[in-house]
Image (spheres, rainbow, N blue to C red):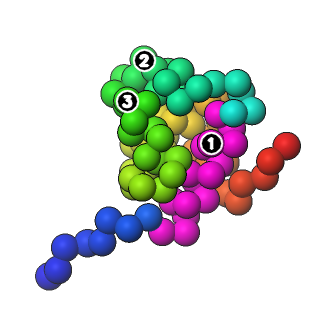
Amino acid sequence: MPPRSLEVGPAGIRAARTIEILRTERGLSQRQLAGRVTALGHPMSNTMLSRIERAQRRCDADDLVAIAEALLASPLVLLQRPTAT
């Protein structure tokens, strides 16, 4: 069986965009959000977060839940179509 592709699919791209929108709406830098995620027990550097937001790194379920918690949002919100407010 060939290895699974590491490309970011449509849901990952939506999540990436929504994470960036929510982070900026809350006035957080990538470094601050990564710090919040790390403080919740899921180590994440600002470089990792940047790559997730640019859809250059897959956001796995653990990443998604931790980022959502740090943004005070539901993981489902991160998977929905992004809407700028």
| Residue 45 disc label | 3
**Residue indicated by mark 2:** 39
Q: Position of residue 76 (x, y in %)?
A: 62, 50
Quadrant of the rendered structure where residue 43 is?
top left
Q: Amino acid at mark 1?
A: Glu
Visible residue check, residue 22 = yes
Q: Which residue is mark 1?
A: 20
Disc 2 and disc 1 in contact, CB within 8 angstroms: no
Residue 20 picture quarter:
top right
Q: Which residues are magenta?
A: 9-23
Helix, strand or loop under label 3: loop
Whole-number angstrom distance, CA of label 3 to CA of label 1: 15 Å
Q: Nearer the viewer, mark 2 or mark 1?
A: 1
The three-letter code of the residue at mark 2 reads: Ala
Q: Nearer the viewer, residue 30 or 81?
A: 30
Pointer 2 or 3: first along the chain: 2
Lower position in the chain sequence, tag 3 or tag 1 = 1
Q: CA distance from mark 2 to mark 1?
A: 19 Å
Which image quarter holds the C terminus?
top right
Residue 40 in sight in this render: no
Vertical placement of residue 34 versus 81, above or below = above
Residue type at mark 3 is: Ser
Above or below 25: residue 52: below
Residue 15 point in image, percent of width and height: 58, 53
Seen at 53% across and 21% down, the residue is: 32
SS for callout 2: helix
Magenta segment main secondary structure: helix
Question: Which residue appears at 47% of the width and 41% of the height?
Answer: 50
Say which residue appears at 42% left-offset and 42% top-offset. Answer: 63
Asked if the stretch drawn in magenta spans residue 19, the answer is yes
Q: Residues within 10 Å of mark 3 (few under 14, many from 20)?
A: some
